Amino acid sequence: MSLDIVRTGAELELAARVVELVRSVAGPSAEAEVMVQHDAEALTRFANSMIHQNVADAVTTVRLRLHLDGRTASGSTTVVGADGLRGLVERTVAAVRLSPPDATWTGLTPPTPLHHSAGYHGSGPQSGLDFGFDEATARATPAERASRVRDFVRAAEGLETAGYCRTTYCSAAFANSAGQAVEGRTAEAAMDGIARVNGSDGVARRASGRITDLDGAALGARAAAKARAGQSPIELAPGRYEVVLEPEAVADVLDNLALFGFNGKAYAQKQSFAELGADQFDPSVTLVDEPLGSRAEPAPGLPFDDEGTPRESLVLVRDGVTRAVTHDRTSAAEAGATSTGHASPASRSWGPYPTHMRLEASPAATEPTLPPAGPSSPTAESARPLVARMERGLLITDFWYTRVLDPKTLVITGLTRNGVWLVEDGEVTAAVGNMRFTQSYAQALGPGQVLGIGSESVLLPDRWTGTRYAAPALHLASWNLTGNASG
């Protein structure tokens, strides 16, 4: 069960066909935009240290948004034959005639060429078919995924393991009645696994645009080392602690900053902490949304959004100064800005947000040279120099069950997970039981609060929001631990 690769250009043909159907059914005054997206996912899942599931799924979805006589309606279908497409158009035309007037309609994206990434080798200005796309990842076989699971399990050396290795492929095209027509495709591989011993869990995750970058043995060894080091935890009193967050925990910080802070709708409605031009973060912080990927982490998304707007790198924060938020056409009009290419089906209600955000790593030359970590060390290599600087604080692997208490100040509550350790004089001295925290993520990264950033940003698997983050380890002056997870 390898992934289903669609013939190049097939989605663009479908999109153009729907636009023509709209003209024939609704007349030349109708404004239509069509997104055709083929998604394929193959998953090899393991539990109790053995593979128990190998599945693959593929579906093509056609989404139509129609504006006619001052009214707007949307529809979608997964039936892509002639009858299915005509039915979609006829249903959407009927719906638009019953919809209320739409005063927020901003019109269609005009014909605009795509932005090319550094690795682009395509031949046409409107084609995004070679934006860092790795054919081998898109066509990965069950055996290739299983070999990485085998390496993970063996590296755990007898500990109970569970997790998955996954490959995904997406090809899509957009066309509208204003003449915009673009296409692109992406592929990604990801692995997420835990090792467990005596109730102690260790985790290791990685994603990449190339399946060859996934090292199951390295991930399994890291998860096992964390699980072994997490046994017999002590309990600490609540309070403010200096912390080193490993990339998995930093990804949750970035996720909430993206959804609630750099969201163009939240910003336009004054529900975001973001203040353009203000020194809101420590000068060491630079945040960039990179939908086209980079040479360091070639895992691009589609080179255009659901409104056909081309995507490109967007600097959100530069040297601590907030520079931008993300917009679709609706939030951009409300804020007096321009679309940054972040429209999605969710953006029309939830708001547009960054989907490929990277916290820039620090130059490696600024970090002390340390001997290699021993096999029992719970600290990831990229976090070790940060831990070595800490007099007394906590090393935290992961967060979960995080919930927003105040979106304006981005106060979050949640729990630690998969390993917490007390650090004294630069050395890990004891495992610590999981704790609850209540912390403003924006304030935690504020001026003077960031004591260090790791030298490597790690690309992590997508989250429930469909977003991907490249995160280094992060050394923070203060994190508010409010109680033990046990009570």
Image (tube, rainbow, N blue to C red):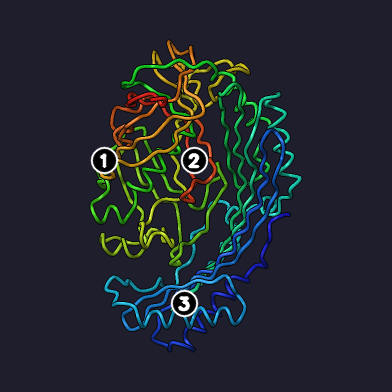
How crowded pointer 2 is (Cα within 10 Å; few <14, some 14-19, many 20+) is rated as many
User: Earlier along the polypeptide chain: callout 3 or callout 1?
Assistant: 3
Q: Name the residue carrying label 2.
A: 470
- Whole-angstrom CA distance, mark 3 to mark 2, is 35 Å
The residue mark sitting in front, 3 or 1, is: 1
Residue 441 is left or right of residue 421, and the answer is left
- Whole-angstrom CA distance, mark 3 to mark 1, is 42 Å
What amino acid type should be assigned to the residue bearing mark 1? Answer: Thr
Q: Relative to 45, is 158 above or below?
A: above
How crowded pointer 3 is (Cα within 10 Å; few <14, some 14-19, many 20+) is rated as some
How crowded pointer 1 is (Cα within 10 Å; few <14, some 14-19, many 20+) is rated as some
Q: Find residue 353 and name its label.
A: none
Q: Give the structural element (helix, strand or loop) at label 1.
A: loop
Q: Name the residue carrying label 3.
A: 179
Q: Name the residue carrying label 1.
A: 409
What amino acid type should be assigned to the residue bearing mark 2? Answer: Ala
Q: Among all residues in the image, which is located at the extreme right?
A: 143
Q: Give the structural element (helix, strand or loop) at label 3.
A: loop
Residue 128 is left or right of residue 212, and the answer is left
Q: Which of 143/337 is in front?
A: 143
- Whole-angstrom CA distance, mark 1 to mark 2, is 23 Å
